[in-house]
Amino acid sequence: MNVNVIAIGKNIITDGRFDFKRMSVLLADRDYEISRIYCAETADDINELIGTFGEDDMVIAVGETAYLFEALGDEDVKSVDYFRRENMTFVVMPEFDERKVKEVVIPLLNVKSRKFFNTVIFRTFGRSEEELREMLRDQIRNRNKIVFDFYPDGEECAVRVRYSRSTSSSAVNDMINAAGEILGDCVYALKDISLAESTAELLLASGLRLSVAESFTGGGVASSLIAYPGMSRCLIESIVAYSNESKKKRLGVSGDVIDKFGAVSADCAFEMASGLLGNPDCDVVVATTGNAGPTAERDGSVGLYYVAVGDRDAVHVFERYRDPREALVRTDAGIRKHITASGINTALFELGKYLKNAKSTRRN
């Protein structure tokens, strides 16, 4: 099937309004290519071009797509992603939409060419796309037409491993096993699922009872879990101990720890978690303390935070730093949101790792 792109509007190809290069890359990853990109400025131009295309061609109309509907004399197709006319498939894309390329264009091409792909997904946390690509460098260079796609979203990144159904099953299994071993603990799920949902599922399946103490995350960890039905079976309590006095009175944090190390410290996170363990009803605890800005406590850094996760056998404290300069919005509120979200996600990720290990231990 020929893939023809009609760029509708003046200078749309040269002014950067549409990412033709990205579209070409996405298609090339699936062994497809754009036959040609045509320019059109009026409905008459479009009619003339359509007359040159063959049956079963795909036409992707980008830019000022109103002229396409005028040319076809059909306003009813404005609200759809694609439609058929005279054995041609038309995909409407006023602005570049990567989702539409992946979820509409490529599946339509697969049906026509009878190409079918299977996909394995690794949902990761804490590694950038660049780091993941470097880790999987040898796997990406494979000669079995097994393709690795990366979809970063903040500290999360989905790694999709895509392959044709005709690919050798042994080659696929070897590749998937190798990738899984390399990615290791940065993988939180093997399906298309959010970090919060994955951790909530693990907690519900574990049957363990959780207590949470939060400072700079302000209840965000508990709120993320409560969004999922059935959490009342597992979440016992959530304490937002924001002030130092609350940390001391509600959680038993030592005044000496606050005075010597500060509230934003590994020692404080450890004692917050330990204080929760005084409740005999809980099995596992999570505590967070950190500095989301705009000012830093003592000599500490804005963006520095600690997450404690554990049980009566051991409490582990994780130190993390989220650079405020990476915030999309550089206002004080934007930076605070950026750092707080990082703390919430780290707490969910480390809790999820704990629950996976606890499950493995119970099996053994």
Image (cartoon, grey):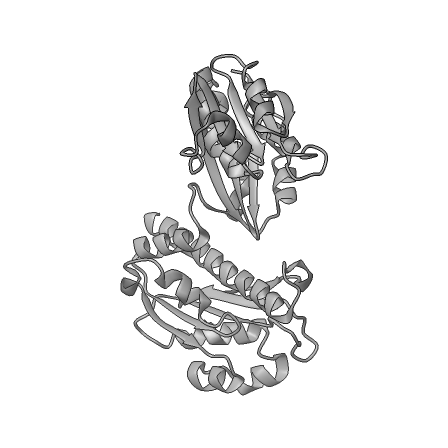
Closest to the observer: 3 or 307? 3
Q: Where is residue 75 in the image (x, y as percent from the top left)?
A: 43, 34
Task: Work out whether 259 lies above or below 237.
Answer: below
Look at 28% across and 65% down and name the residue there: 232
Look at 64% across and 32% down and name the residue there: 20
Outermost residue on the right side: it is 14
Q: Is residue 299 left or right of residue 362?
A: right
Look at 51% across and 21% down and name the residue there: 58
Residue 11 figure quarter: top right
Task: Work out whether 359 lies above or below 344.
Answer: above
Residue 130 figure quarter: top right
Task: Work out whether 79 lies above or below 110.
Answer: below
Task: Work out whether 12 lies above or below 329.
Answer: above
Q: Position of residue 45 (x, y in %)?
A: 60, 23
Look at 48% across and 19% down and name the residue there: 167
Q: Where is residue 246 in the image (x, y as percent from the top left)?
A: 47, 84
Regarding residue 101, the answer to whether it shows in the image is no
